[in-house]
Amino acid sequence: EDKVVQSPLSLVVHEGDTVTLNCSYEVTNFRSLLWYKQEKKAPTFLFMLTSSGIEKKSGRLSSILDKKELFSILNITATQTGDSAVYLCAVVGNFNKFYFGSGTKLNVKP
Amino acid sequence: EPEVTQTPSHQVTQMGQEVILRCVPISNHLYFYWYRQILGQKVEFLVSFYNNEISEKSEIFDDQFSVERPDGSNFTLKIRSTKLEDSAMYFCASQGLLRYNEQFFGPGTRLTVL
């Protein structure tokens, strides 16, 4: 059965901390892995990863994929209260079908 | 910046009634999706649509559900006879070819079935 597992399920940190969110997957015919940030409503796209070992970076956020070990991490450095959200990992498999993890709920305290 | 829009933002209906949720994808996109998210649970894939037909659907997408692109701009999800457990947030997403696999989500329609 295809699945995506995220950990931890929730995380509380203080502003300025660095966090690492994990996503492991077992998906047939992997095509890509995507990270999203979901605040109040719709997910917003952060990164798409298709190749192992190539870090994607956007400001304080970065992500990397390991296709051999079947996981990805999302790093957020110098966290701010505005980073508080649920971070979703999704893996694209056969026929462009998306499999979402349950998300990691990040709470950044001032 | 182009965006996906959805209407209505909130729909309340009685069990057994039919509902149609509407989405306007980004205009030059080719792949369209519906997802749902039951309150407090994870986002679930329902169906993908390409070239005017369903390309993939999940186990959730049974005979009660249908999708249509009636006029080349709107993309609709119909639930024929709603059940209490259909209450959820329904997200539409669209995807182009140039930025392959990057999906843009609409703001969602909250469906409440009483």
Image (cartoon, rainbow, N blue to C red):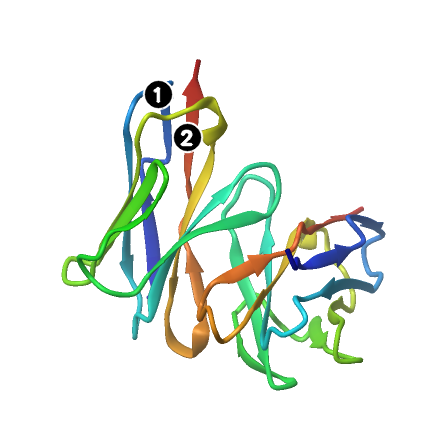
Q: Is residue A84 visible to the viewer in this orientation of the structure?
A: no
Chain that bears disc 2:
A
Where is A106 relative to A98, above or below? above
Looking at the rendered image, the quarter that the C terminus of chain A falls into is: top left
Where is A4 relative to B101, above or below? above
Residue holding disc 2: A106
Where residue B56 appears, x then y in whole percent?
Answer: 52, 77
Q: Residue furthest top?
A: A110
Give residue B85's mark. none
Q: What type is the residue that disc 1 sits on?
A: Val
Mark 1–mark 2 Cα distance, whole angstroms, equals 8 Å
Q: Residue at x 46, y 68 (%)?
A: B99
The answer to which image quadrant residue A74 occupies is: top left
From the viewer's perspective, is B111 left or right of A49? Answer: right
Chain that bears disc 1:
A
| Residues packed near mark 1 inside 10 Å, few (<14), some (14 to 19) or many (20 plus) | some
The answer to which image quadrant residue A18 occupies is: top left
Q: Residue at x 43, y 78 (%)?
A: A95
Q: Residue at x 83, y 64 (%)?
A: B18
Residue holding disc 1: A13
In the rendered structure, are the residues bearing label 1 and label 2 in contact, judged by CB atoms less than 8 Å apart? yes
Q: Is residue A68 visible to the viewer in this orientation of the structure?
A: yes
| Residues packed near mark 2 inside 10 Å, few (<14), some (14 to 19) or many (20 plus) | many
Where is B13 relative to B51, above or below? above
Where residue B75 appears, x then y in whole percent?
Answer: 72, 71
Q: What type is the residue that disc 2 sits on?
A: Leu
Where residue A50 appears, x then y in whole percent?
Answer: 29, 65
Q: Which element type, helix, strand or loop, lies under badge 2?
A: strand
